[in-house]
Image (cartoon, rainbow, N blue to C red):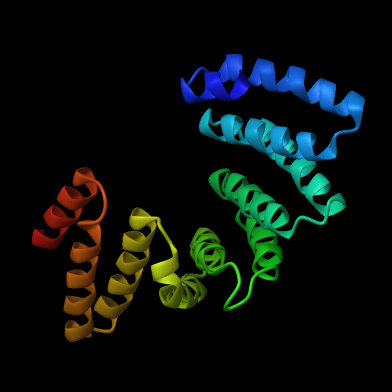
Amino acid sequence: LGKTHWLLYHPDEALAYYRQSLSVCQQLSDLEGMLELYNAMANIHFKKGMMDMCHSCLRCYLTLAGILSKDTARLNAFISIGRTLLLRQRYTEAKKIFTKALNLTTETNYRRERGLIYGYMAECYLGIGEKSKALVNFCKQIPFFDDIDDIEGKCETLRHLIEEKQLIKDVNWTMRLCSNRIQLSQMGSIDLQVILLVKSII
């Protein structure tokens, strides 16, 4: 019932059912069930913008993932916790969490997650005013572009690289990156395409 209410976007009703299910799982010591429920509840709190509640659920999710030796769940928990910190502008804390997440990935395993983490770390560095380190991380994200399904995130990465090339007056690279960014936006929403086309004209 919780999943059904969430699919219909009735977040409060969904949370109520999830809490009831969680209580049952706790009584039965069903760790797998608790893991799924904390993750589901964290997602709802995140969508509602309730980052403190989301963070609390994610800490429980992370703990259970560790107990159950579920590496993918641990990685997702670290990334999600980092995102809640990033949205609250707690950049230094977020960077530490993303570093832990990065250590769970390799060049071949969890490529999508590794690429996303480099982007999030770049945002952390921008937040604390270390633009050069931010650009390094945006550059590290490039080899993982094909593994990332976040078109807006990719366009944002290219925007930072374009700004860097503009600063050093590298016209050829700036033009190539602008062209790539417009082509990439065509895989995204109409709003994204319009925004980028307007900016490229200006």
- Image: 163 above or below 13: below
Q: Position of residue 127 (x, y in %)?
A: 52, 58
Q: Residue at x 64, y 34 (%)?
A: 40
Q: Residue at x 60, y 19 (%)?
A: 14
Q: Position of residue 198 (x, y in %)?
A: 12, 53
Q: Quadrant of residue 33?
A: top right
Horizontal relation, residue 145 to residue 115: left or right:
left
Which quadrant: the N terminus? top right
| Frontmost residue, 131 versus 20 | 20
Q: Position of residue 187 (x, y in %)?
A: 25, 56
Q: Position of residue 61 (x, y in %)?
A: 75, 42
Horizontal relation, residue 173 to residue 52: left or right:
left
Horizontal relation, residue 106 to residue 135: left or right:
right
Q: Residue at x 63, y 52 (%)?
A: 82
| Frontmost residue, 145 versus 122 | 145
Horizontal relation, residue 133 to residue 52: left or right:
left
Which quadrant: the C terminus? bottom left
- Image: 139 above or below 151: below
Q: Residue at x 70, y 52 (%)?
A: 73
Q: Quadrant of residue 88?
A: top right
- Image: 134 above or below 72: below
